[in-house]
């Protein structure tokens, strides 16, 4: 039985991540984010590794909605097209940053979230051992996965640079919603 109360910080012994190669994180990969359906983020180079019909724009910037330059892409399929039998990734050596940093999620300062147990078999197994959910607030020494942290830190740097570039360009930022197949102004999404 798992205690569903969210712990504000993890104070247990370091958790050493071991991927169980279950493929769960490569299936059902679209999420509801602030009322929009979104897939995992891809850079332009990463998007080129996918069949064209499995990728859509994700983030763009422009002075208005009719003049948007796409800056990030997203997988638009529920199951990743690169997942093959035995839960193998057929582009493993070139897989996107978003796959490399999983189960680490986006950071806030020196702490980061980890994936929900529903999304990662290793996390759900660990939660069953501990008896509680592990949603939030890990520091590097508390979640041991050097390669995930390298990818996580690189992705955070790219996101920060993208934000700075957009602010300096004085353009609006837009997010593409896979449900309605349309762009939304990001400020409007946050306030609606
Ligand atoms: S690219 Fe590979 S690791 Fe990433 S979601 Fe697809 S199958 Fe999984
Ligand atoms: S869900 Fe977790 S344990 Fe399963 S393949 Fe993905 S990272 Fe590994």
Image (tube, rainbow, N blue to C red):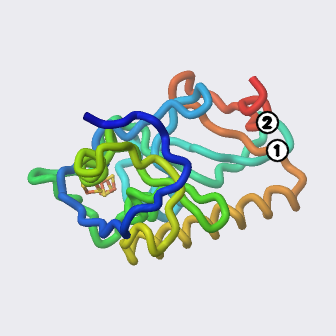
The residue lying toward the viewer, choosing from 112 and 53, is 112
Locate residue 154 relative to residue 92 in the image: left or right: right
Determine the quadrant in which ligand 1 lies: bottom left
Which of 91 and 123 lies nearest the eye of the viewer? Answer: 123
| Quarter assignment of residue 174 | top right
Image x and y of residue 168, in percent: 88, 61
Q: Which residue is tagged 2? A: 187
The residue lying at 30 percent from left, 37 percent from top is 2
Where residue 162 appears, as percent x and y from the top left, is 71, 61
The residue carrying mark 1 has its beta carbon less than 8 Å from ligand 1: no
Residue 134 on image: x %, y %: 41, 49
15, above or below 23, in the image: below
Residue at x 43%, y 45% (from the top left corner): 75
Asked whether the residues under the numbered discs 1 and 2 touch, taking CB atoms below 8 Å apart as contact, a structural biologist would say yes
The disc placed on residue 172 is 1
| Rendered position, 189 above or below 116 | above
Q: Which mark is residue 74?
A: none
Query: Residue 36, percent across and down?
Result: 57, 29
21 left or right, relative to 164: left
Give SS at disc 1.
strand
Crowd around label 2: few <14 · some 14–19 · many ≥20 (10 Å):
few
Q: CA distance from mark 1 to mark 2?
A: 9 Å
At 35% from the left and 64% from the top, the residue drawn is: 95
Q: In the figure, residue 76 lies in which quadrant?
A: top left
Residue at the location (46% across, 72% down)? 149
Q: Which numbered mark, 1 or 2, is in the foreground of this view? A: 2
Report crowding for label 1: few under 14, some 14 to 19, many 20 or more residues within 10 A (C-alpha): some
Count of all numbered marks drawn on residues in the image:
2
Residue 73 in the image: above or below residue 139 = above
Q: Looking at this view, is 87 or 18 the one in front? A: 18
């Amino acid at each position: 039985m798992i205690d569903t109360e969210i712990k504000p910080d993890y104070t247990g012994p370091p958790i050493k991540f071991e991927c169980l190669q279950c493929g769960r994180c490569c299936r059902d990969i679209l999420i509801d984010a602030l009322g929009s359906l979104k897939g995992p983020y891809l850079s332009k180079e990463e998007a080129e590794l996918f069949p064209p019909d499995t990728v859509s724009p994700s983030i763009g910037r422009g002075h208005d909605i009719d003049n948007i330059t796409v800056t990030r892409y997203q997988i638009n399929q529920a199951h990743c097209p690169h997942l093959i039998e035995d839960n193998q990734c057929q582009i493993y050596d070139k897989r996107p940053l978003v796959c490399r940093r999983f189960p680490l999620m986006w950071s806030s300062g020196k702490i980061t979230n980890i994936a929900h147990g529903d999304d990662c078999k290793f996390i759900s197994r660990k939660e069953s051992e501990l008896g509680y959910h592990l949603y939030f607030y890990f520091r590097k020494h508390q979640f041991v996965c050097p390669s995930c942290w390298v990818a996580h830190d690189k992705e955070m740097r790219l996101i920060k640079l993208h934000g700075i570039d957009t602010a300096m360009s004085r353009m609006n930022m837009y997010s593409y919603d896979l449900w309605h197949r349309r762009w939304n102004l990001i400020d409007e999404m946050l306030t609606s």
